[in-house]
Image: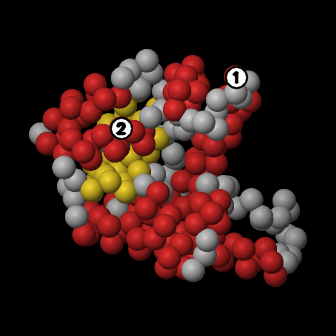
Amino acid sequence: MVITIGREFGSGGRELGRLLAENLGIDYYDKEIITEIAKNTELSENYVRQVVEKNPHDLFPITVAHTFSYIDVQTIQQKQMIFDEQEKVIKKMAGTSDCVIVGRCADYILRDIKPYRIFVYADMDSKVERCLSRSDDAKGLPRKKLVKKIKSIDKNRARYYNYYTGETWGNKLNYDICVNTTNVNIADLVPHIAKMIKG
């Protein structure tokens, strides 16, 4: 049993994944993926995290006809190397045990084994409230800045996913179930989702 979770920032997808793994008695992988990539590439976790959370082609020149500088090519190659390593790590995790894997294009990377694919989303008010109640970084931020941050993170997630998969992030046709967590207690949802997965 392999379950992948794509999620909008602030939707509670990470919490849903963790609780679902606990309910089903299986492994849960999220930040551990970054740790493994860093170990295997001898790059810092912070650097790997920055690479996988930013637009993967933000260093391409505005005009394609321009010549790439050496540093641009090197950076692009390093980003691709990190994605390739991420693919290896995710496939190894999925091949080792039943698990829930959050983010990192796992639904696409594992498409050959047909994982159960979940996408978690919510309206903006709910995402803002969830961020304020769960994240120290969000506390004290004006609502306008927090909304901007949420939109920016989701935009980068979409670009990253779309770039490496050729698919559209959040497209309901790419998932087995889409879960709207607006004004919902995530812990209350988990037993129902677990029951659906078990069949």
The type of residue carrying mark 1 is Arg
x, y percentage for residue 189?
29, 28
**Figure quadrant of the C terminus:** top left
From the viewer's perspective, is residue 155 above or below residue 75?
Answer: above
From the viewer's perspective, is residue 198 above or below residue 130?
Answer: below
Task: Examine the rendering and report whether any part of residue 151 can be seen.
Answer: no
Q: How far is the residue under mark 2 from the one under mark 1?
A: 24 Å
Helix, strand or loop status at disc 2? helix
Q: Which image quadrant for residue 137?
A: top right
Q: What residue is pinned by disc 1? A: 143
* Residue at figure coordinates x 41%, y 27% from the top left: 180
First in residue order: circle 2 vs circle 1: 2
From the viewer's perspective, is residue 126 above or below residue 169?
Answer: above
* Residue at figure coordinates x 72%, y 74% from the top left: 75
Out of 61 and 33, give the one closest to the viewer. Answer: 33
Out of 183 and 154, give the one closest to the viewer. Answer: 183
In the rendering, which numbered label is found on residue 96? Answer: none
In the image: residue 84, left or right of residue 137: left
Badge 2: residue crowd in 10 Å (few <14, some 14–19, many ≥20): many
Badge 1: residue crowd in 10 Å (few <14, some 14–19, many ≥20): some
**Figure quadrant of the N terminus:** bottom left
Q: Which image quadrant for residue 115?
A: bottom left
* Residue at figure coordinates x 45%, y 71% from the top left: 36
Q: What residue is pinned by disc 2? A: 16
Out of 177 and 138, give the one closest to the viewer. Answer: 138
x, y percentage for residue 172?
41, 37
In the image: residue 13, left or right of residue 73: left
Task: Examine the rendering and report whether any part of residue 109 can be seen.
Answer: yes
* Residue at figure coordinates x 51%, y 38% from the top left: 8
Helix, strand or loop status at disc 1? helix
